Protein backbone atom coordinates (compact mmCIF):
# COMPACT_ATOMS: atom_id res chain seq x y z
CA UNK A 1 0.00 0.00 0.00
CA UNK A 2 1.56 3.26 -1.15
CA UNK A 3 -1.33 5.69 -1.26
CA UNK A 4 -4.65 6.62 0.30
CA UNK A 5 -7.42 8.25 -1.68
CA UNK A 6 -9.91 10.12 0.47
CA UNK A 7 -13.42 11.03 -0.48
CA UNK A 8 -14.07 14.60 0.67
CA UNK A 9 -17.75 15.26 1.55
CA UNK A 10 -18.62 13.21 4.63
CA UNK A 11 -15.06 11.86 5.08
CA UNK A 12 -12.60 14.74 5.50
CA UNK A 13 -15.28 17.29 6.35
CA UNK A 14 -19.01 17.26 7.08
CA UNK A 15 -20.13 19.20 4.04
CA UNK A 16 -22.69 16.41 3.53
CA UNK A 17 -24.93 18.32 5.98
CA UNK A 18 -24.70 21.41 3.74
CA UNK A 19 -25.57 19.34 0.65
CA UNK A 20 -28.65 18.17 2.56
CA UNK A 21 -29.66 21.72 3.56
CA UNK A 22 -29.20 23.05 0.03
CA UNK A 23 -31.20 20.23 -1.61
CA UNK A 24 -33.89 20.57 1.07
CA UNK A 25 -34.26 24.29 0.35
CA UNK A 26 -34.71 23.64 -3.37
CA UNK A 27 -37.10 20.72 -2.76
CA UNK A 28 -39.21 22.79 -0.35
CA UNK A 29 -39.47 25.65 -2.84
CA UNK A 30 -40.62 23.19 -5.51
CA UNK A 31 -42.97 21.35 -3.13
CA UNK A 32 -41.03 18.10 -3.61
CA UNK A 33 -40.67 15.64 -0.72
CA UNK A 34 -37.07 15.24 0.47
CA UNK A 35 -35.58 13.67 3.59
CA UNK A 36 -32.29 12.34 5.05
CA UNK A 37 -32.89 8.90 3.55
CA UNK A 38 -33.14 10.31 0.03
CA UNK A 39 -30.11 12.48 0.82
CA UNK A 40 -28.07 9.36 1.65
CA UNK A 41 -28.65 8.15 -1.91
CA UNK A 42 -26.93 11.30 -3.20
CA UNK A 43 -23.61 10.49 -1.52
CA UNK A 44 -20.87 10.25 -4.12
CA UNK A 45 -23.31 10.97 -6.95
CA UNK A 46 -22.73 13.94 -9.28
CA UNK A 47 -24.80 17.13 -8.99
CA UNK A 48 -26.99 16.46 -12.06
CA UNK A 49 -27.57 12.80 -11.17
CA UNK A 50 -28.42 13.90 -7.63
CA UNK A 51 -31.00 16.32 -9.03
CA UNK A 52 -32.62 13.47 -10.98
CA UNK A 53 -32.93 11.48 -7.73
CA UNK A 54 -34.39 14.49 -5.88
CA UNK A 55 -37.00 15.00 -8.61
CA UNK A 56 -37.67 11.33 -9.43
CA UNK A 57 -41.19 11.02 -7.97
CA UNK A 58 -42.30 14.58 -8.66
CA UNK A 59 -44.00 16.56 -11.42
CA UNK A 60 -40.54 17.86 -12.36
CA UNK A 61 -39.04 14.45 -13.16
CA UNK A 62 -39.31 15.12 -16.90
CA UNK A 63 -38.36 18.83 -16.75
CA UNK A 64 -36.25 19.93 -19.71
CA UNK A 65 -32.51 20.27 -19.39
CA UNK A 66 -32.62 24.08 -19.23
CA UNK A 67 -34.92 23.93 -16.19
CA UNK A 68 -32.80 21.23 -14.61
CA UNK A 69 -29.64 23.27 -15.11
CA UNK A 70 -31.33 26.23 -13.40
CA UNK A 71 -32.41 24.06 -10.47
CA UNK A 72 -28.92 22.60 -10.09
CA UNK A 73 -27.46 26.10 -10.17
CA UNK A 74 -29.94 27.26 -7.53
CA UNK A 75 -28.95 24.35 -5.27
CA UNK A 76 -25.25 25.00 -5.88
CA UNK A 77 -25.63 28.70 -5.04
CA UNK A 78 -27.27 27.83 -1.72
CA UNK A 79 -24.57 25.23 -1.08
CA UNK A 80 -21.76 27.69 -1.81
CA UNK A 81 -23.31 30.28 0.51
CA UNK A 82 -23.12 27.66 3.27
CA UNK A 83 -19.52 26.80 2.31
CA UNK A 84 -18.55 30.48 2.51
CA UNK A 85 -18.89 30.33 6.30
CA UNK A 86 -16.35 27.52 6.65
CA UNK A 87 -12.91 28.10 8.18
CA UNK A 88 -9.95 25.85 9.17
CA UNK A 89 -11.67 25.53 12.56
CA UNK A 90 -14.32 23.36 10.91
CA UNK A 91 -11.70 20.68 10.27
CA UNK A 92 -11.77 18.25 13.19
CA UNK A 93 -8.47 17.97 15.09
CA UNK A 94 -8.68 14.17 14.83
CA UNK A 95 -8.81 14.37 11.04
CA UNK A 96 -5.90 16.81 10.82
CA UNK A 97 -3.80 14.78 13.27
CA UNK A 98 -4.46 11.53 11.38
CA UNK A 99 -3.66 13.08 8.00
CA UNK A 100 -0.47 14.57 9.42
CA UNK A 101 0.60 11.22 10.90
CA UNK A 102 0.00 9.47 7.56
CA UNK A 103 2.04 12.12 5.75
CA UNK A 104 4.90 11.63 8.24
CA UNK A 105 4.86 7.92 7.36
CA UNK A 106 5.52 8.85 3.73
CA UNK A 107 2.14 7.71 2.44
CA UNK A 108 0.94 9.50 -0.68
CA UNK A 109 -2.49 11.07 -0.36
CA UNK A 110 -5.08 12.22 -2.85
CA UNK A 111 -8.64 13.45 -2.80
CA UNK A 112 -11.10 11.41 -4.90
CA UNK A 113 -14.36 13.37 -4.89
CA UNK A 114 -17.30 13.74 -7.29
CA UNK A 115 -17.62 17.39 -6.28
CA UNK A 116 -16.81 20.35 -8.49
CA UNK A 117 -16.46 22.40 -5.28
CA UNK A 118 -13.65 20.25 -3.84
CA UNK A 119 -10.83 22.80 -4.23
CA UNK A 120 -12.96 25.58 -2.78
CA UNK A 121 -13.74 23.42 0.28
CA UNK A 122 -10.09 22.35 0.74
CA UNK A 123 -8.98 25.99 0.60
CA UNK A 124 -11.65 26.99 3.09
CA UNK A 125 -10.56 24.40 5.67
CA UNK A 126 -6.84 25.06 5.25
CA UNK A 127 -5.98 21.91 3.25
CA UNK A 128 -5.56 23.63 -0.11
CA UNK A 129 -1.91 22.55 -0.40
CA UNK A 130 -1.97 19.43 1.76
CA UNK A 131 -2.70 16.61 -0.70
CA UNK A 132 -0.31 15.20 -3.29
CA UNK A 133 -3.13 15.14 -5.85
CA UNK A 134 -6.76 16.14 -6.27
CA UNK A 135 -9.12 14.18 -8.48
CA UNK A 136 -12.60 15.69 -8.44
CA UNK A 137 -15.81 16.39 -10.33
CA UNK A 138 -13.94 18.65 -12.75
CA UNK A 139 -11.72 15.90 -14.18
CA UNK A 140 -14.24 13.08 -14.64
CA UNK A 141 -17.07 12.27 -17.01
CA UNK A 142 -18.62 9.47 -14.92
CA UNK A 143 -19.27 9.76 -11.21
CA UNK A 144 -19.15 7.00 -8.58
CA UNK A 145 -19.85 4.03 -8.69
CA UNK A 146 -17.75 4.42 -11.85
CA UNK A 147 -14.07 4.01 -10.85
CA UNK A 148 -12.86 6.95 -12.99
CA UNK A 149 -12.28 9.44 -10.14
CA UNK A 150 -10.08 6.96 -8.22
CA UNK A 151 -8.20 5.71 -11.29
CA UNK A 152 -7.38 9.34 -12.15
CA UNK A 153 -6.19 9.92 -8.58
CA UNK A 154 -3.84 6.91 -8.81
CA UNK A 155 -2.64 8.21 -12.14
CA UNK A 156 -1.95 11.70 -10.73
CA UNK A 157 -0.03 10.09 -7.84
CA UNK A 158 1.86 7.90 -10.30
CA UNK A 159 1.02 4.69 -8.43
CA UNK A 160 -0.75 1.49 -9.46
CA UNK A 161 -4.41 1.15 -8.53
CA UNK A 162 -3.67 -2.00 -6.52
CA UNK A 163 -1.35 0.04 -4.27
CA UNK A 164 -4.17 2.41 -3.22
CA UNK A 165 -6.70 2.26 -0.39
CA UNK A 166 -9.86 4.38 -0.57
CA UNK A 167 -11.72 5.95 2.39
CA UNK A 168 -15.43 6.48 1.69
CA UNK A 169 -18.77 7.33 3.34
CA UNK A 170 -20.78 6.45 0.21
CA UNK A 171 -21.71 2.92 -0.78
CA UNK A 172 -21.36 4.09 -4.41
CA UNK A 173 -17.78 5.07 -3.53
CA UNK A 174 -17.01 1.63 -2.07
CA UNK A 175 -18.24 0.07 -5.35
CA UNK A 176 -16.12 2.55 -7.32
CA UNK A 177 -13.04 1.59 -5.30
CA UNK A 178 -13.62 -2.12 -5.87
CA UNK A 179 -14.19 -1.58 -9.58
CA UNK A 180 -10.82 0.22 -9.61
CA UNK A 181 -9.36 -2.89 -7.86
CA UNK A 182 -8.61 -0.86 -4.75
CA UNK A 183 -9.37 -1.81 -1.14
CA UNK A 184 -11.94 0.36 0.60
CA UNK A 185 -12.38 1.61 4.17
CA UNK A 186 -16.03 2.38 4.93
CA UNK A 187 -17.08 5.06 7.40
CA UNK A 188 -20.31 6.90 8.21
CA UNK A 189 -23.27 5.95 6.03
CA UNK A 190 -21.23 3.40 3.99
CA UNK A 191 -20.76 1.16 7.04
CA UNK A 192 -24.38 -0.01 7.10
CA UNK A 193 -24.13 -1.65 3.65
CA UNK A 194 -21.29 -3.92 4.77
CA UNK A 195 -19.37 -3.69 1.48
CA UNK A 196 -16.15 -2.15 2.76
CA UNK A 197 -12.99 -4.19 3.36
CA UNK A 198 -12.81 -2.48 6.75
CA UNK A 199 -15.36 -0.47 8.73
CA UNK A 200 -14.30 2.38 10.98
CA UNK A 201 -16.23 4.39 13.54
CA UNK A 202 -13.56 7.06 14.01
CA UNK A 203 -11.19 8.66 11.51
CA UNK A 204 -8.05 7.88 13.57
CA UNK A 205 -8.73 4.13 13.11
CA UNK A 206 -7.25 4.55 9.62
CA UNK A 207 -3.86 4.52 11.36
CA UNK A 208 -4.55 1.05 12.79
CA UNK A 209 -5.38 -0.31 9.33
CA UNK A 210 -2.49 1.25 7.43
C1 LIG B 1 -20.07 14.36 -3.72
C2 LIG B 1 -21.23 14.34 -2.76
O1 LIG B 1 -18.90 14.45 -3.00
O2 LIG B 1 -20.17 15.47 -4.62
C3 LIG B 1 -22.54 14.36 -3.54
O3 LIG B 1 -21.17 13.18 -1.95
C4 LIG B 1 -22.57 15.56 -4.49
O4 LIG B 1 -23.63 14.37 -2.64
C5 LIG B 1 -21.34 15.50 -5.41
O5 LIG B 1 -23.76 15.56 -5.25
C6 LIG B 1 -21.28 16.68 -6.36
O6 LIG B 1 -21.02 17.84 -5.61
P1 LIG B 1 -20.97 19.32 -6.20
O7 LIG B 1 -20.28 20.10 -5.10
O8 LIG B 1 -20.18 19.29 -7.46
O9 LIG B 1 -22.38 19.74 -6.42
MG1 LIG C 1 -18.80 11.37 0.58
Image (cartoon, rainbow, N blue to C red):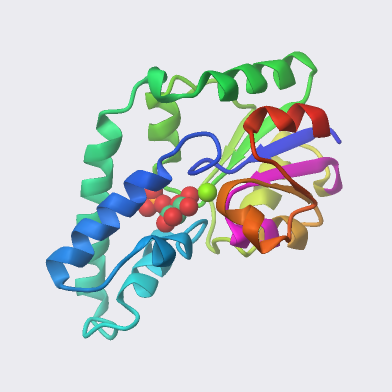
Could you say where residue 34 lies in the image, as x and y percent from the top left? 30, 67
The residue positioned 77% from the left and 25% from the top of the image is 107
The residue positioned 39% from the left and 73% from the top of the image is 53
Horizontal relation, residue 122 to residue 73: left or right: right
The residue positioned 22% from the left and 66% from the top of the image is 27
Horizontal relation, residue 185 to residue 181: left or right: left
Picture quarter with the N terminus: top right
Q: Is residue 135 above or below residue 101?
A: below
Could you say where residue 193 lies in the image, as x and y percent from the top left? 66, 63
Q: How many marks?
A: 0
Q: Is residue 138 above or below residue 99?
A: below
Horizontal relation, residue 56 to residue 145: left or right: left
Residue 178 among those drawn in magenta: no
Tell me if residue 210 can be seen.
Answer: no
Q: Nearer the viewer, residue 99 or 150?
A: 99
Q: Is residue 30 above or below residue 151?
A: below
Q: Nearer the viewer, residue 139 or 8?
A: 8
Which span of residues is magenta-colored? 162-175
Residue 168 among those drawn in magenta: yes
Could you say where residue 77 lies in the image, as x and y percent from the top left? 21, 48
The quarter of the picture where residue 146 lies is bottom right
Picture quarter with the C terminus: top right
Amino acid sequence: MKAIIFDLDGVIIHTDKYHYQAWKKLADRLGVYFDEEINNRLRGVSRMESLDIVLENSDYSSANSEMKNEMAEEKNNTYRELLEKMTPEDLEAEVLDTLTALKQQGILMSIGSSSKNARLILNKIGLGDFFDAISDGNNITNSKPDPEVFLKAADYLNVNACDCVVVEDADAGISAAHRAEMKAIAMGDAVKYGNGDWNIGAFREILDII
